[in-house]
Amino acid sequence: MPTALYIHIPFCLKKCAYCDFVSAAGSTIPYDEYAAGVVREMELRSELLLHPLAATTLYLGGGTPSLLPPAAISRFITTARSRYGLSPDAEVTMEANPGTVTFKTLSAFHDAGVNRLSLGIQSLDDRLLNLLGRAHTAAQAEEAYAAARAAGFDNIGLDLMHSLPGQTVLEWEESLALVVALAPEHISAYGLTLEDGTPLHRQWEEGRLMLPDDEEGALMFELTTERLTAAGYEQYEISNFALPGRRSRHNQTYWKREPYLGFGAAAHSFLNAPSFGRRWQSPNDPAEYLRRVTGGELPEMESIILTRREAMAECFFLGLRTSDGVDTKRFHDCFGESVEQSYGAEIRRLLSQGLLERHGRHLAIPASRLILSNQLLVHFV
């Protein structure tokens, strides 16, 4: 069964001011001990598989996976190959932050089997990087990119953020130009979201943080599509752009609602069985996670069996984020009824308003309307 694999590394040099992911700086857990725990979980899970898997992607996310020694990354990849049939041509992605990598370590990661790098630069403006609480400078971001190229990486994605405090539309346009000049294969460009409990959210609540208004944010979103499309990138998801043939294979697994197994603290998993699918996650606390796996226990919690209606809603909610949209034939094959039978009134209304369009057997949000995606997706939840 084709399956994607994800490994979560919850360690950081510094917790960013906007981040609500499960990660922490200054952890007392040795990296090697954590890596051994992840391998143990991979072994435990593989022993319970009813059918052999054929893993097509492996994604190392976090946190900051590039803090781990290359030997640990190599061990993950080796285990994925031996236990989960990770194919020789699999996409193996590792997230990395500037300031945590050198030409030497990047070369070692590449030699270990990482063939795609996701570099979290977020901005090439030192003022904004400092405001975000990033642990690197713009110069370090460009140095890390150059080192990755020199180390042999020919598939690099860069993460950027817009709608930042004090950022102007002109500054964002200049950032896009700088990133396009680097010519990465993939660009993820996200608008800042203020998550509850983060330092930036508290500053905003206290009136100490001024954000671009909705009109400026919309202009930045539209400018992103315009500039990146003109540079040869395709917008294949709301915030993701790729050169032809360079879409993230792993992330498409999520949007297509295909199975994936997550390992490590806070990792999420999804299998499309039993019934219409099951989701679960591991404990957020790395110490609790390690206690369970070292004791020979699978660290599952919050296991949810999806209902038919929930699975249908997920199919639309995830599919309409992408330029391909919802595959109506696949929907019928999965649920035994057409999209019109399930959501006929909503679909007809959105089609008549130009907020949905048909491409053969696919239903998709027009590229010019993707900025309204959040308002449209609620029709199918």
Image (spheres, rainbow, N blue to C red):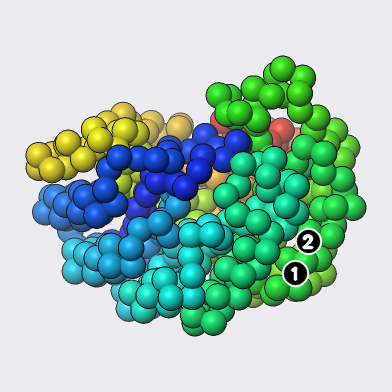
Residue 167 appears at what percent x and percent y?
82, 44
| Residue 191 numbered mark, or none | none
Q: Answer few, some or many: residues within 10 Å of disc 1's Cα (few below 14, many 20 plus, some between 14 and 19).
A: some
Q: Name the residue under label 1.
A: 180
Mark 2 secondary-structure assignment:
helix
CB contact under 8 Å: marks 1 and 2: yes
Please identify the residue farthest to the top as the structure is shown: 206
Q: How many labels does the image show?
A: 2
The quarter of the picture where residue 237 lies is bottom right
Mark 1 secondary-structure assignment:
helix
| Residue 176 numbered mark, or none | 2
Query: Does residue 85 appear in the picture of this structure?
Result: no
Residue 186 appears at what percent x and percent y?
62, 66
Q: Answer few, some or many: residues within 10 Å of disc 2's Cα (few below 14, many 20 plus, some between 14 and 19).
A: many
Location of residue 42 with respect to 57 vertically, above or below: above
Foreground pick, 70 / 191: 70
Q: What residue type is labelled 1?
A: Val
Mark 1–mark 2 Cα distance, whole angstroms, equals: 6 Å
Q: Which amino acid does label 2 sit on?
A: Leu
Query: Does residue 297 appear in the picture of this structure?
Result: yes
Residue 98 appears at what percent x and percent y?
56, 60
Quadrant (top left, top right, bottom left, bottom right) of the C terminus: top right
Location of residue 288 with respect to 106 vertically, above or below: above
- Kindly identify the residue that appears in the image at 45 percent across and 52 percent down: 64
Report whether 370 appears left or right of 320.
right
Report whether 1 appears left or right of 50.
right
Report whether 140 appears left or right of 305.
right
Foreground pick, 245 / 199: 199
- Kindly identify the residue that appears in the image at 71 percent across and 33 percent down: 375
- Kindly identify the residue that appears in the image at 79 percent across and 59 percent down: 175
Location of residue 173 with respect to 341 vertically, above or below: below
Residue 18 appears at what percent x and percent y?
61, 36
